[in-house]
Amino acid sequence: MRKIKIFDTTLRDGEQSPGCSMNLSEKIVLAKQLEKLGVDIIEAGFAISSPMDFKSVQAIAQAAPECTIASLARCNKNDIDTAWEAVKDAKKPRIHVFIATSEVHMKYKLRMTPEQVLQAITDMVGYAKSKCPDIEFSAEDASRSDREFLSQAFSNAIAAGANTINVPDTVGYSTPQEMGELINYLREHVAGIENVDISVHCHNDLGMGTANSLACVKAGATQVECTVNGIGERAGNASLEEIVMALRTRRDFYDADTNINTREIYKSSRLLSNITGVPIAPTKAIVGANAFAHEAGIHQHGMITNAQTYEIMNPDEIGIPHRALVLGKHSGKHALRERLESMGYEIPDDELEDIFTRFKKLADEKKTVTSSDLEALTLHRSRIIRPESGESSVPFCQLVSHSITSGSGVPKISYVQIRRSDTNKLMDGVESGAGPLDAAFKVINKMLGVEARLEDFSIRSVTEGEDSIGEAVVKISSASSGEMYTGSGISTDIVEASLAAYIAGINKMFDEERAVVSD
């Protein structure tokens, strides 16, 4: 059975999706989870695009030694030099060089002739090879390129030293039949293709990203480029969890599998959703809330008789925790650790202390604490991971208490008390506003002396029952830098969840701006 390499580009192409940006600490946390997930290659970023992207690629190169770490680079020496500087300390570095090969891209974007593009491929893949032993070459917009010209482009790249050739459906235009035929054509017409990996990178503009990728695997591709939850430019990328579980579930058809530890899929999906604040659609394949739910009576009867009647996968396979009621307010720290470990979470002692404190608070508010509640507490850690050390630290400020006055025909007033970690000083204030949250956000800004603007706000239930946990997600922008920051918070009190989310966004803003100053 063939092993298909999984090239995860969540941290590069995925992060380019609107609303999915991550700060350095969050990228490190996600990269370590991708390593646990078992992806073969992590595309850590586009190093030349910004100083922060360079720093992110460099940090991830050291944080995930079990994975090949790649940086994207255009076909020019400056890009390639910067990419190499960013990944050179990785145990397994890769430079991912690309240039467009379709007529429309060459004419209107590159303003280069086909002959100039072919020469650039030869020169720049060769230049990258002189620096790094592992080179991937992508022909941007390959699915809309002339096949004869595309074959020559890939032949030049292989002759210059490429180890992997990537065939992107950059704008999600192609169909499964066309993509399969394209791979077969390239296998017959590209010189030296039998000595390299054939990769595919399919976008989801027509909803066929996963289907196109799988058609390529069937035709002989050996690497698939994808993202967790399918995030990415426009309508997103082929979804990692869908690719992996399709290959796993239909091994009889594809005769292929991956090195992915599927029991880490659900955790990876939830972690990314928590970091970006982008919820997972209930009907999302594999990881959506309804993926293993059965409401119709005939389905339920079949499930009771034999689960295989309506389930082609076991939820345990992807790491979905059992939803049994497990702990209460009299449970101790040891029992909490054991339960978290049984759910697949390895928590350092200092972070366990923080989770335990919040667990006790939650247990006082709820009759019983479920696995869903514990999962929410674990994902919403209040501590910040420092990329340079990998250690956690207390965030800049924390919510201590709050009180609101609200109602029809009365002023909306909020009182908020916070504690600054740098001075251990308690600060409080009162403000009025259009609503209690508007007032609360105003007083937080005033106390901390920041100019943060609320760009988006949402709240939803993340656990079950009338005493369920609510998750608030805010997106704020910094008046000084214009950068956007996402914060999330949880509580059975939706006002408290909202304040915690806003403060989490403020903490990210302070953390990143302090990192820039220290550089």
Image: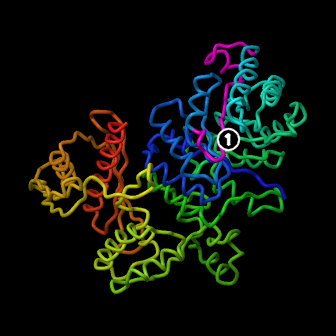
How many residues crowd around disc 1 within 10 Å: few (fewer than 14), some, or many (20 or more)? many
Examine the image and state in which quarter residue 402 appears.
bottom left
- At x 50% / y 56%, what residue is drawn? 280
Is-magenta flag for residue 508?
Answer: no
- Secondary structure beneath dot 1 equals strand
**Residue at the spot of label 1:** 202
Where 212 sits versus 379, above or below?
Answer: above
Side of 42 where 179 appears, left or right: right
Residue 282 or residue 183, whichever sits in front: 183
- Give the vertical position of 378 relative to 157 (above or below): below
Q: At which x and y percent is residue 441?
A: 21, 49
User: Residue 151's x, y, as percent?
Assistant: 83, 28
Is 317 located above or below residue 152 in the figure?
Answer: below
Q: Residue at left 81%, top 42%?
A: 180
Give the residues drawn in magenta, as a range: 87-114
Query: Which residue is more in the foreground, 501 or 54?
Result: 54
Quarter of the rendering occupied by the C terminus = top left
Give percent across and percent down for residue 31.
Answer: 54, 52
Farthest residue in the bottom direction? 330
Q: Pick out the residue farthest to the right.
A: 188
Q: Residue 92's x, y, as percent?
A: 66, 46
Taking the magenta stretch, the answer to whether it contains residue 92 is yes
